[in-house]
Image (cartoon, rainbow, N blue to C red):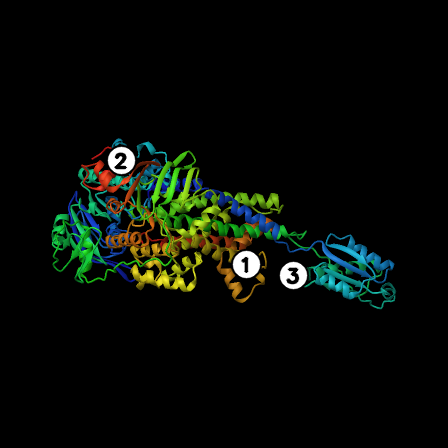
């Protein structure tokens, strides 16, 4: 008999079915992966199993059955839930130590030497033992997630439910989170249900369930799933049939294609599923810019740029150059100073030290910066959209902020909507749309005034595989057709490979600045860019 | 109920309140309201700018104008040789509040018992203020008439007016106790709503949802800090009232304290109800303010006694707890009957039931699941 069994679980939110008839089984010590686009029903199923949302169907765990949150109550000492969102369950004014004490107390665990020992072990696994006095609000994203995880583990749950614990987390912290999880399930025999947006992680799990619009559509071990899609995956080739799509690294086609096959990753599941269902994946296009301009050879030059917050140095004398028409990837762990650096470039933070030259003009005063605003486009981590305005209204608002002529704005907005594939969502509110659509129309908003340089801060975090692939098509097309320069931050190391050049930050300092090929040459043993990244961060591997 | 769980939650609430500096609002807001409203609401009129045109310039007319000049209620300017039009223009331009015209032959007619007429014009832009000023003017003139004419008119009744409970007719005495009823309804409700809605908005509410912490434990942990913090406000507000505003206190302090505690619990219950239906802190604050400040002000008895209300307003006044609490509070400050009065006893019991009902309703509706 399975230790955990979900029988036909259906969760409904305000009469909208979030997940329908989901069933699964898991054994002690197994890690079960949930993958799928946002809104596919992963979180809803997790909430149901954790006993925090009403559902139909039944959950059998350790021989006990529950059908509602109320019936789940006696089982809660055995369950741990870490909901989606970085540091969501943390109180920003409480320290690391106070969090562990609070979670111990509300889980009603008596003080004992074994508890103290376990707690110390968790702190060390998370690498948080030097920071026990630091308030959670002052931890980096990766540390917050590690703290959330060990707080969820303090009562030794037998069923651990982790909702996207690694989204928006840097590769190093991701590995550390994974190590904690792996050790706990081995030593405690915990069943872990984990949803993730990183297919490299899904590949490490014992079983993977693929979610699509409220249903589980495939399940199996990673290799079983990969086997099913291997025959449809090819080296990138132009598509000739309708049931075919080409991404940055692959061509997926249901109809046989005269091209060499390529070993797929789990990401292939999303594309092939979309093709099978006959979903129209909008083709991304970019037409030439209306106002032709000459992009200067060096768009941005920073010399010794420094930013301090109190005695904490967020960026420490950073030199960087953004050349005309290049895509520059800015990488680094959470808290390495990437966002701070971009905010200095934009003038959102005053520069404490160093020189900044934008488009050939040294920036000293706010006035000089204002004159350049018309040449810069920016998309922030949270996309900065107005939630109570439709996509169309948002775009018109941004157009008028740039003092664009109404007729011209109208024309550009409808052209972008068509080319970037969000035409049919124009009259919906951003909060009702998938992240991928919001991301594309945020970029469209930043392109309305046809900038010369584009700053993008983690545009792909939490965005599903298909939308990410379309996003990169858009970015490469922008570079090709418009010849503009793009500075982008990301936590997907596979995306780093699409950049022309990489700058790696570590604790506020620049540790690498080179092209992707040169970096591979430097580390001939590295199988993926992630390994190169980790090389700089720690001497592991 | 597990005391260890509740204690851990309460400790966390206190730490958060202190570190987020929200504690300042808990104590600054009530004091701010009592000081702003306590000084700000003024029913009585002093220093009304008065223009007297004395066309008679006799002994009696001068005697009358001197009475105005000597009163703290009037800033009097006596002029002659100014036309009525000019004088009225001065009211129009808000330079003058009251215009009094004494006709020539005033003294002569008066001595001849010919009933002379004095013209009085009052700026009526604010009706309440205007009628107050009108009464003051009448008072001065009648008072003068009764002393100047040594022989009193036969049919003139002298009224020996004495205002009970608030003899000097001080505004502070009439308003400040009512303000306590307003503040202790608004402030605890806001804080208790915030403590729950903040967790909802930030997502930490999942710690309650996903653990075995019971609803009772959670609610108790949210109520206790608000109750303790605002209990201190009962004393602070008492000090402001008696020391800063010099309101007399004639009743029992125990009754004041006890009924205030019950009233705070009622307010916390309102906050719980707000937290059930709201998801964001800003909505919770606005909603709490709307449902507490308006009734807390209108039905406080500050502006209008409940007994003189009728129809819908009377029914509404009886629905809100403000009326019952304020009745007891005004009694403890100004009258001092205390529990000897059957009405006070009844109202205290009503407050008790109100508190229990609100808390019970609030805690019934708090759910332990998302959605």
Q: Quadrant of the C terminus of chain A?
A: top left
Q: Quadrant of residue A502?
A: top left
Q: Which residue is mark 2?
A: A536
Q: Nearer the viewer, residue A509 or A374?
A: A374
Q: Nearer the viewer, residue A378 or A76?
A: A378
Q: In the rendered image, is residue A267 in sight?
A: yes
Other residues around mark 3 within 10 Å, as few (<14) / some (14–19) / many (≥20): few
Q: Nearer the viewer, residue A113 or B353?
A: A113
SS at mark 3 in the image: helix
Q: Nearer the viewer, residue B67 or B284?
A: B284
Q: Which residue is mark 1?
A: B298
Q: Are marks 1 and 2 on the same chain?
A: no
Q: Are marks 1 and 3 in contact (CB under 8 Å)?
A: no
Coordinates of residue A126 in the picture (x, y in percent): 27, 36
Q: Quadrant of residue A242?
A: bottom left
SS at mark 1 in the image: helix
Disc 2 chain ID:
A
Q: Mark 1 and mark 3: span between their CA atoms? A: 17 Å
N-term mark: 1 or 3: 3
Q: Are marks 3 and 2 on the same chain?
A: no
């Amino acid at each position: 008999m399975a230790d955990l069994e979900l029988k036909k679980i259906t969760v409904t939110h305000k009469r909208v079915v979030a997940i329908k008839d989901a069933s699964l089984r898991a054994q002690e010590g197994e890690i079960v992966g949930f993958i799928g686009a946002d809104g596919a029903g992963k979180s809803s199923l997790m909430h149901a199993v954790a006993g925090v949302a009403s559902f139909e169907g039944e959950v059998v765990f350790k021989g006990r059955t529950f059908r509602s949150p109320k019936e789940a109550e006696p089982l809660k000492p055995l369950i741990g839930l870490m909901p989606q969102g970085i540091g969501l369950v943390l109180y920003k004014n409480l320290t690391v130590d106070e969090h562990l004490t609070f979670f111990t107390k509300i889980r009603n665990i008596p003080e004992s030497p074994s508890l103290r020992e376990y707690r110390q072990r968790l702190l060390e696994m998370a690498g948080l033992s030097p920071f026990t006095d630091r308030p959670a609000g002052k931890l980096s994203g990766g540390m917050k997630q590690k703290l959330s995880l060990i707080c969820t583990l303090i009562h030794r749950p037998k069923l651990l439910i982790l909702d996207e614990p690694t989204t928006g987390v840097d590769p190093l912290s991701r590995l550390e989170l994974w190590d904690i999880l792996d050790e706990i399930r081995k030593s405690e025999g915990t069943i872990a249900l984990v949803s993730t947006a990183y297919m490299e992680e899904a590949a490490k799990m014992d079983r993977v369930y693929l979610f699509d619009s409220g249903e589980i559509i495939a399940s199996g071990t990673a290799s079983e799933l990969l086997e099913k899609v291997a025959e449809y995956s090819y080296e990138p080739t132009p598509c000739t049939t309708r049931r075919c799509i080409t991404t940055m690294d692959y061509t997926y086609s249901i109809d046989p294609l005269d091209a060499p096959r390529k070993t797929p990753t789990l990401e292939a599941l999303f594309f092939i599923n979309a093709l099978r269902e006959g979903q129209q994946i909008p083709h991304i296009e970019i037409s030439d810019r209306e106002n032709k301009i000459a992009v200067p050879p060096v768009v941005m030059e920073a010399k010794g740029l420094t930013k301090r917050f109190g005695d904490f140095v967020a960026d420490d004398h950073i030199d960087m150059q953004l050349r005309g028409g290049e895509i520059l990837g800015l990488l680094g762990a959470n808290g390495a100073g990437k966002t701070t650096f971009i905010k200095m470039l934009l003038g959102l933070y005053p520069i404490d030290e160093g020189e900044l030259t934008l488009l050939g003009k040294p920036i000293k005063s706010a006035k000089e910066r204002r004159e350049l605003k018309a040449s810069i486009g920016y998309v922030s981590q949270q996309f900065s959209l107005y939630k109570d305005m439709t996509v169309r209204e948002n775009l018109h608002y941004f157009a008028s902020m740039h003092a664009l002529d109404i007729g011209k704005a109208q024309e550009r907005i409808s052209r972008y909507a068509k080319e970037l594939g969000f035409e049919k969502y124009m009259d919906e509110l951003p909060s009702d749309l998938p992240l991928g659509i919001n991301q594309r129309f945020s970029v469209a908003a930043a392109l309305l005034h046809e900038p010369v340089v584009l700053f993008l801060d983690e545009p792909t975090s939490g965005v599903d595989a298909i939308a990410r692939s379309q996003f990169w098509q858009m970015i490469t097309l922008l570079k090709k057709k418009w010849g503009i320069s793009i500075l982008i931050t990301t936590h997907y190391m596979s995306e780093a490979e699409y950049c022309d050049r990489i700058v790696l930050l570590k604790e506020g300092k620049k540790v690498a600045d080179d092209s992707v090929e040169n970096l591979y040459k430097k580390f001939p043993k590295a199988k993926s860019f992630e390994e190169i990244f980790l090389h700089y961060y720690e001497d592991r591997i | 109920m597990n005391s260890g769980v509740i204690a851990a939650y309460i400790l966390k609430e206190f730490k958060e309140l202190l570190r987020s500096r929200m504690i300042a609002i808990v104590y600054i807001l009530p004091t701010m309201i009592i000081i702003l409203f306590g000084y700000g609401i003024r029913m009585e009129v002093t220093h009304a700018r008065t223009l007297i045109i004395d066309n008679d310039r006799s002994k009696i007319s001068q005697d009358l104008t001197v009475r105005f000049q000597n009163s703290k209620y009037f800033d009097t300017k006596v002029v002659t040789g100014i036309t009525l039009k000019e004088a009225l223009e001065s009211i129009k331009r808000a330079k003058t509040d009251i215009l009094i015209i004494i006709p020539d032959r005033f003294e002569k007619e008066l001595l001849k018992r010919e009933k002379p007429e004095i013209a009085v014009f009052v700026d009526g832009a604010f009706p309440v203020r205007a009628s107050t000023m009108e009464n003051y003017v009448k008072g001065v003139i009648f008072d003068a008439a009764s002393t100047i004419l040594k022989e009193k008119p036969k049919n003139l009744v002298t009224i020996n007016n004495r205002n009970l409970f608030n003899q000097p007719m001080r505004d502070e005495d009439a308003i400040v106790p009512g303000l306590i009823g307003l503040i202790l309804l608004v402030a605890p409700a806001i804080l208790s709503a915030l403590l729950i809605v903040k967790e909802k908005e930030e997502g930490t509410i999942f710690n309650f949802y996903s653990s075995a912490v019971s609803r009772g434990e959670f609610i108790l942990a949210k109520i206790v800090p608000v109750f303790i913090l605002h209990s201190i406000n009962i004393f602070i507000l008492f000090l402001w009232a008696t020391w800063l505003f010099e309101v007399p206190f004639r009743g029992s302090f125990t009754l004041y304290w006890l009924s205030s505690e019950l009233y705070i619990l009622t307010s916390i219950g309102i906050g719980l109800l707000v937290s059930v239906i709201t998801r964001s802190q800003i909505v919770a604050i606005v909603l709490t303010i709307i449902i507490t400040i308006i009734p807390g002000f209108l039905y406080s008895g500050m502006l209008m006694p409940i007994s003189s209300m009728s129809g819908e307003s009377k029914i509404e006044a009886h629905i809100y707890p403000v009326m019952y609490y304020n009745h007891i509070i005004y009694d403890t400050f100004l009258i001092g009957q205390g529990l000897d009065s059957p009405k006070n006893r009844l109202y205290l019991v009503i407050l008790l039931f109100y508190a229990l009902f609100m808390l019970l309703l609030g805690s019934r509706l708090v759910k332990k699941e998302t959605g």
